[in-house]
Amino acid sequence: MAKLRLGIAISLDGFTAGPQQSEENPLGIGGAQLHEWAFELAAWRAPHGMEGGEVNPSSEIVEESLENIGAVVMGRNMFGGGPGPWSDEPRWDGWWGDDPPFHTPVFVLTRHAREPLPMQGGTTFHFVTDGIESALRQAKDAAGGKDVSLGGGANVAQQYLAAGLLDELRLDVVPVLLGGGTRLFENLDGAEVELEQLRAVEAPGVTHLKYRVLH
Amino acid sequence: MAKLRLGIAISLDGFTAGPQQSEENPLGIGGAQLHEWAFELAAWRAPHGMEGGEVNPSSEIVEESLENIGAVVMGRNMFGGGPGPWSDEPRWDGWWGDDPPFHTPVFVLTRHAREPLPMQGGTTFHFVTDGIESALRQAKDAAGGKDVSLGGGANVAQQYLAAGLLDELRLDVVPVLLGGGTRLFENLDGAEVELEQLRAVEAPGVTHLKYRVLH
């Protein structure tokens, strides 16, 4: 059965973004350190239109995260453009330029309706205003039997985890202490989340942990 | 140079003990789950006087944690016996019976003085009332060039980490969410802790992460 899969980078002290997140600094203070291991990889650079890069044990992890994905769900913060209603002037079409690296339908959770936004390369952003279950249902329909990737951020991840809708969780554990910021594992409203460890992969500057969420 | 080494079990959401720790339930609600991977190992059972048990990739981790250790430092809670001055009737000599599994001098951090307590098998408990630096100095002297093991709990670990006195950190990451309890990484008073990832080992029901603390 098609799965909802989340992969997210996390500091050793449990934060997915540093303190003082803002529009100018969406990862918070120190938060960019969580992604350095990926930026250096050929497997990450190629889909983002960049040449070169390293091959190491993280490469397979990144490649696997893109395999068999038919749709993406993400939160408004990850799509960006600030809070509140959508504006035409200036218009915000995401962080990723004309050809975003998704190449599938992407369902953006928001409180503010907006027409679908087709981009180059097969990515179309759909804006979902009626909640996480609707977004997942639409994404699964669009994925045509493939898995759905949950893009984050932490707040959206928490909602899907608490609702028992997440099937697979990959944590990229980075050896930094951010000391504050956004925690992945909170606001779970007392949900009993049971996990089964599937895999641990050591790589330069990161360890990739993978869990199945038991239902 | 002799190192101060900490190995501690931690839930995926960052807790080393569950909520509502008490004298009756020193690991807090759900906290015992953090140690199940160890209880099943022959490498853990033998030094605790028990027969049988499994051999798996955790075995080497447990064996390594006991190698080249010349002394132990631990907090009062880990030694047990409740808070406050020591009592003779009933007398508390630790959780571990007549022959504790340390077989070295053990320095217990406490606010309350007590005479040294020699046990069978080479373990002697020394009670240190003048702080973490004194305890570490005494332990290093007693260890005769070998490393010192930091026994925990989290509060003691935080103090040594914040003071820049810890050299090596092993986290046994267990796939449970405790949802509350005692966090390892807090109360660090803004200390800048830099870590270098040394190793990640996947084992049944646990992943062992090892870091060097950079000074």
Image: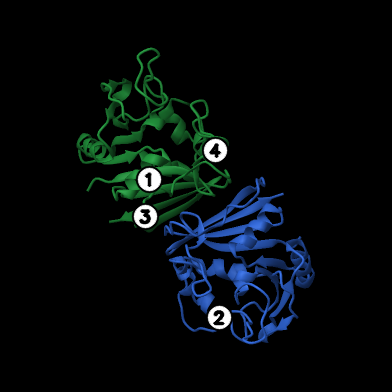
Chain colours: A blue, B green
Q: Is residue A127 above or below residue B180?
A: below
Percent position (x, y) of residue A39?
A: 48, 74
Residue that label 3 marks: B190
Identify the chain of the residue marked 3, using the numbered disc in the image: B
The answer to whether residue A167 of the structure is visible from this angle is no
Percent position (x, y) of residue A212?
A: 64, 53
Residue that label 2 marks: A48
Q: Do the residues at discs 4 and 3 belong to one chain?
A: yes
Q: Do the residues labelled 4 and 2 touch (CB within 8 Å)?
A: no
Q: In this view, does B31 lie above or below A75?
A: above
SS of the residue at dot 1?
A: helix
Going from N to C along the chain, the mark reached first, 3 or 1, is: 1
Residue that label 4 marks: B19
Residue that label 1 marks: B158
Percent position (x, y) of residue A87?
A: 66, 82
Image quadrant in which you'd find residue A158: bottom right
